[in-house]
Image (cartoon, grey):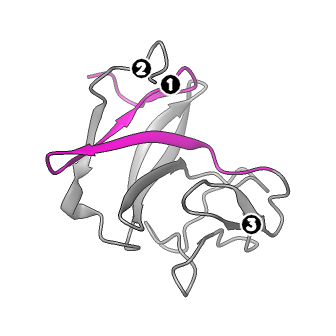
Amino acid sequence: MNEPDTPSQGLPLCPSEALEERGRAHSFDVLQWNQPARAFALRFDGEVVAYLNRCAHVPTEMDWQEGEFLDRDKQYIMCSIHGAVYDPRSGRCVTGMCGRMGLTKITVSEREGQVYWYPSRDTKPAFEE
Ligand code: FES
C-alpha cells in the first residue's frame, strides 16, 4: 500500500537497463526531513532496491566510488568508511558497526522498462517538478 502522501505513479528514476544485476548503482538527490541527501538504487537478484546513501554508523555516504556499494563478492552492501555490512534485499545490518540499525529504504517499482521511486512523508524529491 502507498503512503497517504505518495504519488500513485511514482517518480521516474532511470531506465531499467541502467541497472545491471549487482552492478553500479544509480544515485539521486532527495530531501530527507527537508535536508539535502543522496540516495541510490541498484539491482540485486533481479529486484531493484533503493536506500538513502547514509550509513547507520555515522551519517555519511557509503560508496567506494560513485555508485559502487557492493563488497568484492557482490553479496552485500558494504560501507567504505568502516566496513559495516548490510543485506541488499532489506537494508538490515548484517555485521559491523551498524548495530541494530539498517539503511533507510526507499520504495521503488519497475514497469515497462522504467524504474520509479516513491516519495514518503520523510523523503521527498530534491526538486519539485
Ligand atoms: S561510517 Fe559506515 S561503518 Fe562507519
The answer to whether residue 82 is above or below residue 13 is below
Image x and y of residue 43, in percent: 38, 63
| Front residue of this view, candidates 24 and 118 | 118
Q: Residue 83's quadrant in the figure? A: bottom right
The amino acid at mark 1 is Ser
Q: Secondary structure at mark 3?
A: strand
Image x and y of residue 25, in percent: 40, 63
Residue occupying image coordinates x 45% and y 53%:
49
Residue that mark 1 sits on: 120
> Label 2 near label 1: C-beta < 8 Å?
yes
Q: Is residue 107 magenta?
A: yes
- Magenta-highlighted residues: 101-129
Could you tell me how far apart the alpha carbons at marks 1 and 3 are, in whole angstroms?
26 Å
The amino acid at mark 2 is Thr
> Label 3 near label 1: C-beta < 8 Å?
no
Q: Secondary structure at mark 1?
A: loop
Q: Quadrant of the C terminus?
A: top left
Mark 2: few, some, or many residues within 10 Å (few <14, many ≥20)? some
Front of the two marks 1 and 3: 3
Q: Earlier in the sequence, mark 3 or mark 2?
A: 2
Query: Label for residue 68?
Result: none
Q: Earlier in the sequence, mark 1 or mark 3?
A: 3
Residue 77 horizontal side relative to residue 47, left or right: right
Residue at the extreme top:
4
Q: Is residue 105 magenta?
A: yes
Q: Earlier in the sequence, mark 1 or mark 2?
A: 2
Could you tell me how far apart the alpha carbons at marks 3 and 2 are, in whole angstroms?
30 Å
Residue that mark 3 sits on: 94
The amino acid at mark 3 is Val
Residue occupying image coordinates x 74% and y 68%:
84
Residue that mark 2 sits on: 6
